[in-house]
Image (cartoon, rainbow, N blue to C red):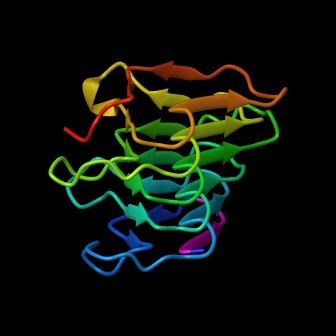
Amino acid sequence: FGLFVEGACNVLRGNFIGTTPGGMCAAPNIWDGIWVSGDSNLIGGVNAGDGNLIAACGRSGIHVDSGSGCEVRGNCIAGNIGDGIHISGAGFEAGHVVAGNRIGLFAPSCGAAGNGGHGVSLHDASGITLGGEDAACANRIGGNMGHGIVVSGSLSRAHAIMGNVIGVDAD
């Protein structure tokens, strides 16, 4: 794992995971770039420099494995072997928010670098907000080998998926 976090109220900002410092070359991890379990964790943010660059990881870029109230905002997640973002749970109302991320896309001048799985996978998780009504909340998802967004599992319910831009190039 690039970062393995169990616990609540952690802030993960401005990291280069699966890359060299500055993000210019791959330095792969074998597992997920970020694996987090717990309540109210923040991965990235809305201000310049808050987002994490997560690339070249052996599984998902970000895996949220339970808890509630986590936010995944403003990250660039591309070139991972598995899903860009994978959220799994036990079907309870998690209340996670995934907004303003570039998934399968690098910066506009660098083009697509899709993840090997889906852009975003929600499995047996409920109550996830993916995107939002404000344009800044839109996730830009493209270039992934699987679907842009997948909701699966008999316990998945009550998601709000809105305002995302799916199947796009990096610009």
Q: Residue 162 at x, y = what percent?
A: 44, 19
Please name the residue shown 80% across and 33% down the image. 91
In this picture, residue 159 sits left or right of residue 123: left
Q: Is residue 152 visible?
A: yes
Span highlighted in magenta in the image: 2-8
Q: Residue at x 55, y 33 (%)?
A: 147
Q: Position of residue 154 (x, y in %)?
A: 84, 26
Q: Residue at x 55, y 56 (%)?
A: 62
62 left or right, relative to 164 = right
Where is residue 111? Give x, y as percent: 25, 49
* Quarter placement of the N terminus: bottom right
Q: Name the residue located 47 percent from the left edge and 43 percent from the top edge.
A: 144
Specify the farthest residue to the left.
Answer: 109
Q: Is 6 within the magenta? A: yes
Which residue is nearer to you in this view: 105 or 125?
Answer: 105
Q: Where residue 52 sits in the image (x, y, percent)?
A: 37, 62
* Residue farthest along the front direction in this orientation: 145
Quarter of the image with the C terminus is top left
Give the vertical position of 13 relative to 158 (above or below): below
**Residue 100 among magenta residues:** no
Q: Is residue 128 visible?
A: no
Q: Quadrant of residue 26?
A: bottom left
Specify whether 124 is left or right of 140. right
Give the left or right position of residue 26, taking residue 154 as reference: left
As rendered, which of 77 and 79 lies closer to the eye?
79
